[in-house]
Structure formats: structure tokens, C-alpha cells
Amino acid sequence: MALQGETTEKPTAARIGSRRDGPTAMKVDSMADIDIPLSEIPERLFDPEKWARVIHWYSGRREALEALGQREPGLLLYTAEQAANRGHLRSQLTLSVLRTKETLVAEFKAKLAEGHLVVTALQPPDLARVTIPAGIWDNLQPDFVRNSAVGAGFSFVDIRVSEAAAAPAQDEAIAACISWLAARRQSHGDEMKKVLQKAAAEHFGTRLTTRQFDQAYAAVYQRGRGRPRGAPEK
């Protein structure tokens, strides 16, 4: 599926149109000198201690980058959780690293979805660089080794990232909720969405709306509703 659009005087602005064949994105000029390839994002934006831990676990940076682009099968996570709950040390370490990896990617994708970063790419066979609309990042899986992303019928290559203008205050609430959800997942494991929403309401009060919680939940768990895989029924 190709994104189409017109060149304008604002190269970092993204526009989604309505067409029979899907969303559209505006063509943009090159952002040389201020943008970086996707593969350099971990050293620029990830928490240094968390990223170093992931690299150490996978025995190398390239292996860690490959792991970032892979979603772990639900059965693997469930098995690791069960073994970790029985006190198996290796499984506890494995589960901790997997969740750290998921958190790093979720936080990065949240910044993309919220417009904190501007992302441009190529969409073969079209050689014109386009801006990837912020609204489709929930459905894309980034590949940090190959500077690419796929999902929802889209395929992007030669991805480059630059910083956008300051985000509105409500985005700060979403980012805070993402960090809180990620930390709670580390300590409590997977929980039902309604349990998390109640706990978030008690923690954030009126600073967080239901819509903001839904966006944060989707970023951390890669799903909009329902029970995360492995979460116990309550």
C-alpha cells in the first residue's frame, strides 16, 4: 500500500487523507543534518541503563536491535511467567529483560504516535520521501536493524527520525501513564485492563482522562482492550 500526497512548504507536517485505497501522507523534502536513522534511536532516546541491560542479555548490540523488532509469542511469555512465579531464577531474569525490551519499544512508539518525533521514510517503489502519519504507529512494528517498519498493509524503508515541536500538556499525561504502566507491569505482571484503569485513576486522579489512559494502555500492551496474554482473571 502506497502513501500519496503533495509537496508543501512545511516538510515536517503529516496529513492523513481519505481515499478508497487507504490513508495518505504528504511528500516531504530531505531533512539532512538534523535527522538520524532508526538504528541510532536506542543510543539517543532509550534509557541508557535499560538499553545496556538488553544488550548484555542478548550478547551484543546487533542482537539486541534484532530483538527489539520481534514480538515475543504469547506462549513464551506465559511459560516464562509461570516458571518465574515458581521461583525459577533464569525465568525471572528472562521475563524481566523481555518486559524491559517491550517497555523501551512502547515508550518510543508512544512518542511517535503522540507527535513528539517526526519520522520520514521511503515506500518502494516510490522514491519520494514521505512523512509517516503519527496515527498509524500503533499498527507498525519497527525494525531497528534495517531502518524499516511494517504493519497494517504498509511497508516503510530507510526510516529517519527527527525531533518535533514541543507536545501539548495532555501528551505529558499520556507519557507519565505509559511509564507508570510499564513500571507496574514489571512489579505486578500482566493485569486486566479494568484493574489497571482503576489503579491509574487512584494514582493520577483528574490529571488523566479515560482517553489518555486508553492510549497509554495500547502503547504498553499493544492492544486497545481486553485482558493481556497471561493476565489472571479477577
Image (cartoon, rainbow, N blue to C red):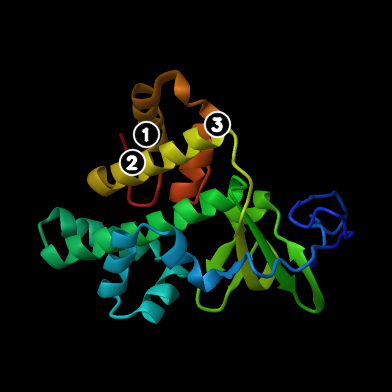
Nearest to the observer: residue 110 or residue 169: 169
Q: Residue at x 52, y 49 (%)?
A: 110
Above or below, 98 relative to 138: below
Q: Quadrant of the N terminus?
A: bottom right
**Residue carrying label 3:** 169
- The disc placed on residue 191 is 2
Q: Position of residue 75 (x, y in %)?
A: 34, 63
Is residue 208 or residue 163 the one in the foreground? 163
Residue at point 66%, 49% (across, down): 135
Secondary structure found at label 3: helix
Residue placed under numbered mark 1 in the picture: 196
Instruction: From the top left corner, tell me how far across and down residue 67 is, in percent.
Output: 40, 72
Residue type of the residue flagged with mark 1: Leu
Q: Residue furthest front?
A: 33
Amino acid on which disc 3 is placed: Ala
Q: Quadrant of residue 227?
A: top left
**Helix, strand or loop status at disc 2:** loop
Q: Earlier in the sequence, mark 3 or mark 1?
A: 3
**Front position among marks 3 and 2:** 3
Q: CA distance from mark 3 to mark 2?
A: 28 Å
Is residue 46 shown left or right of residue 32? left
Q: CA distance from mark 3 to mark 1?
A: 22 Å
Residue lying at the far top in this picture: please name it: 206
First reached walking from the N terminus: tag 1 or tag 2: 2
Disc 1 vs disc 2: Cβ atoms closer than 8 Å? yes
Q: Secondary structure at mark 1?
A: helix
Q: Are marks 3 and 2 in contact (CB under 8 Å)?
A: no
Q: Nearer the viewer, residue 202 or 171?
A: 171
Q: Image height check: is 50 above or below 196?
A: below
